[in-house]
Amino acid sequence: MKVIRKIGEMMDISEIYRREGRTIGFVPTMGYLHQGHTSLFKIARKKSHILVVSIFVNPLQFGPNEDYKEYPRDLQRDLEICKNENVDIVFAPSESEMYLKDFSTFVEVKNLDEELCGKYRPGHFIGVATVVLKLFNIVKPHIAVFGLKDAQQYFIIRRMVRDLNLDIEIIPGPTIRESDGLAMSSRNVYLNSEERKQATVLYKSLMLAKDIIEKGERSASRIIYEMEKFIKENAPLSKIQYIQIVDTNNLKPIEELKSEFLIALAVFFGKTRLIDNIIISLDGTTNII
Ligand code: PAF
């Protein structure tokens, strides 16, 4: 396994692989890897000759009061995990390598960032789209895999790829969960034991919503009301930031449930912000391709 720190070196190697006709699969990460990430590596691995994983905590996607400084980092541990997963190249640039002092170009995917996390994290998805486009230009992948735990991110990247005619296949990877349903996340390490116990309410409230929908409920506001009630009753340490039901085509809220929609929520436990979601298709068609 090669560890590459320099943009120029990464670009040169990718160019050689491309000329040799080898398929490059790519999984961008911010490190502190867990099974959620390695499940994405496995998806990419199956579809490519060369698997590249990037590890870069992207300052551009953190707000001024967010956890950029505290974000967990452990490169040595991450490299061990990558080795065990048969990753071919880890691209781990420094911040100064990625962003020159006078860096001044940003990518904005409009409309899709107005609700859900985008509403509460202004500028976050500009930071994500900008770094992902840079990484795509550096790594030159044929395919890239993004986890559906960050569903809004997946839809935004897919739109950017479509709108800017990038020749990259974007593949979604399912959310990987702990045995009690909590979605795996690098931020779970912030939770104390009581918060960790109560954090299962995110997934449980999504399962409650699914159950109510299966019984015939079609009103988004009634489902959101039930989810909110469930979380408040079962997790006194929680503070709900949002619960929303949106159409997967435009990520805009809907009232009457139909075709395919995303139920997503963000909940704080102390300073730790957790997100989760499910995508439900009522007519069997799905936008997740
Ligand atoms: O999902 C993440 O870890 C990040 O948002 C990404 C895609 C690596 C961009 O920094």
Image (cartoon, rainbow, N blue to C red):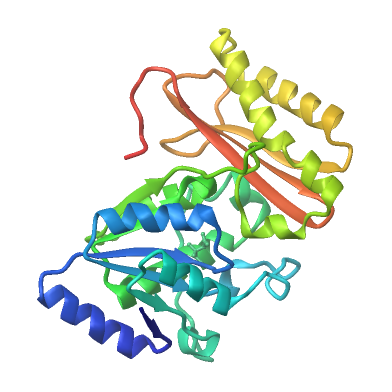
Count of labels in the image: 0
- In the depicted structure, whether residue 282 falls above or below residue 154: above
Q: Where is residue 61, by image quadrant?
A: bottom right
Q: Position of residue 196 (x, y in %)?
A: 78, 47
Q: Residue at x 32, y 83 (%)?
A: 10
Q: Where is residue 179, by image quadrant?
A: top right
Q: Position of residue 100 (x, y in %)?
A: 49, 90
Which quadrant holds the C terminus?
Answer: top left
- In the depicted structure, whether residue 53 falls above or below residue 160: below
| Residue 130 visible in the shown view | no
Q: Nearer the viewer, residue 210 or 152?
A: 210
Q: Residue at x 78, y 48 (%)?
A: 268
Q: Residue furthest top?
A: 216
- In the depicted structure, whether residue 103 falls above or below residue 245: below
Q: Residue furthest front?
A: 84
Answer with left or right where residue 154 lies relative to residue 8: right
Q: Position of residue 245 (x, y in %)?
A: 58, 30
Q: Where is residue 282, by image quadrant?
A: top left
Q: Position of residue 30 (x, y in %)?
A: 54, 68
Q: Residue at x 78, y 54 (%)?
A: 191
Q: Nearer the viewer, residue 94 or 261?
A: 94
| Residue 251 visible in the shown view | yes
Which quadrant holds the N terminus?
Answer: bottom left
Q: Residue at x 27, y 72 (%)?
A: 140
Answer with left or right where residue 217 lies relative to residue 120: left
Answer with left or right where residue 243 lies relative to residue 173: right
Q: Nearer the viewer, residue 202 or 130?
A: 202
Q: Residue furthest right?
A: 236
Answer with left or right where residue 161 lies relative to residue 104: left
